[in-house]
Amino acid sequence: MDYMSRDEIAEWRPDRPDTPEGMLARARHRMESTGQWRKGQPMGRRFAAGCVALEITQRCNLDCTLCYLSETSEAVRDLPLAELFRRIDLIHRVYGRNCDVQVTGGDPTLRRRDELVAIVRRIAALGMRPTLMTNGIKATRSLLAELAAAGLVDVAFHVDDTQQRKGYADEAALNAVRRAYIERARGLGVAIMFNTTIHRGNFEQVPALARFFVAHADAVRLASFQLQADTGRGVAGARPALITPDAVARQIEIGAGTRLNFETPVGHARCNRYAAALVAGGRAHDLLDDPALVADVLDASTDLVDDRRRPGRALRTYARWAATQPWLWRCGSGWAARKLWAMRHDLVRGHGRMNKVSFLIHNFMDACALERDRIEACIFMAMTAQGPVSMCLHNARRDSFILEPLEVEAGGARRHWEPLTGFADAPARPRKVIAKGRSRLPPPPRA
Ligand code: SF4
């Protein structure tokens, strides 16, 4: 592996902002130069970034054993709204409409409610697609409804046993939390997703988790599995050798009860694995089992936008598009007939209803072992004051970004803002800071 040196990590600069067309061309060039360009590859063809994280607070109401925040995060003041609006505009300027923007933190629901709503509204007003990334504790039905009205497209709940929620011994027990969250968001017109960190303690439970998501495919659009990484203030350290993207994919297949094709390209192959299943009558069937057909469809439909808020409308859009593609009738009708035949009993059992659930395996890197080609081909960016940067690199060097003083244009005046104290011209407001992650561990014994 070609790992980045400490100096290289320290000197790495955010991407120089360009137009969306320029960013797309740059993304394609990076895919080519890192050997990741092939048929069906959406990066550089459909988008220049899979998603962009906008961290609106560094504070969190949990203390996960694999947290990516830093030991200083809790002491950092929330970025001023004017700076966040500037960053949203910058995301729009470089990635354009339809960019997926993750409103994240820390936990974004700790931000003032009116500010969180204004952030989501601004992202949506620019034609981009906001996702709320939350542990769900403060994401009440009423907040989710208000955010949905402001234009929220997805809510991604992070639930797993690294969070050490009291009264939940394992992932099976946490399904009660997942069910409650599904009901909170159901019917609001936002797509529901779940994030699960996979580590040595819950790896064996992945099949049961996959079964849960298949059983709730009527509501859950995406189940994302994020592999243990030694980065940030988390205390659990590096992952054991048995946890690999391939091993997690096999575990998901066991739970889904079917083979799933995890080879559809999404950015760098060592970063992401993606699969999708059609679910009828409670049983999963691989949606992407014809890789050549999938690649042809993806390449031919790069301009289509998947409306995640309204699956019915998305289906109609694809159907209308498919009706104009004679080549697809030839190649796709055989596949569709075979699929429907294989699903016939499940469709009868499920009264003709069919849902789709996707599985994503995301292979974050340890902070001290960043692979250069993956950082260059990264599809998961974080927006900094200067521009977008790979999330793995951002996590490895988080303090250099979050402790940066800023000049903020607010209320027609330029104001100096310090991350630990706030606006220089505002009265000082002392805050109690709670130690989290490694900083709460007892110091090592003296030699
Ligand atoms: S954040 Fe890390 S693991 Fe994810 S796509 Fe970027 S480089 Fe790969």
Image (spheres, helix red, strand yellow):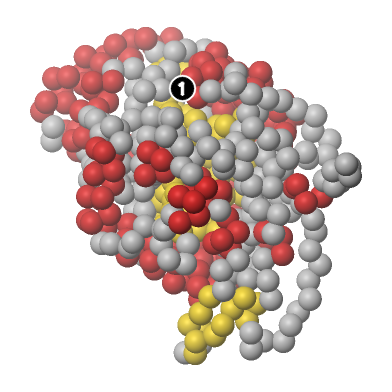
Q: Quadrant of residue 14?
A: bottom left
Q: Please give the name of the residue rendered at 29% of the width and 11% of the height, measured from the top-left corner.
A: 338
Left/right placement of residue 332 relative to residue 231 reads: left
| Residue 341 place in picture, x, y as percent | 33, 10
The one of 179 and 72 positioned closer to us in this rendering: 72
Q: Quadrant of the N terminus?
A: top left
Considering only vertical position in the picture, is 304 above or below 333? below
**In this orientation, does residue 439 appear?**
yes
| Residue 339 place in picture, x, y as percent | 33, 14
Q: Which residue is mark 1?
A: 279
The one of 66 and 345 positioned closer to us in this rendering: 66
Within 10 angstroms of label 1, few (less than 14), some, or many (20 or more) residues?
Answer: many
Left/right placement of residue 428 relative to residue 144 reads: right
Looking at numbered disc 1 in the image, what kind of residue is underneath it?
Answer: Val
| Residue 154 place in picture, x, y as percent | 49, 48
| Residue 319 place in picture, x, y as percent | 24, 35
Q: Please give the name of the residue rendered at 38% of the width and 66% of the height, measured from the top-left corner.
A: 90
Q: Please give the name of the residue rendered at 22% of the width and 50% of the height, measured from the top-left corner.
A: 25
Left/right placement of residue 428 relative to residue 213 reads: right
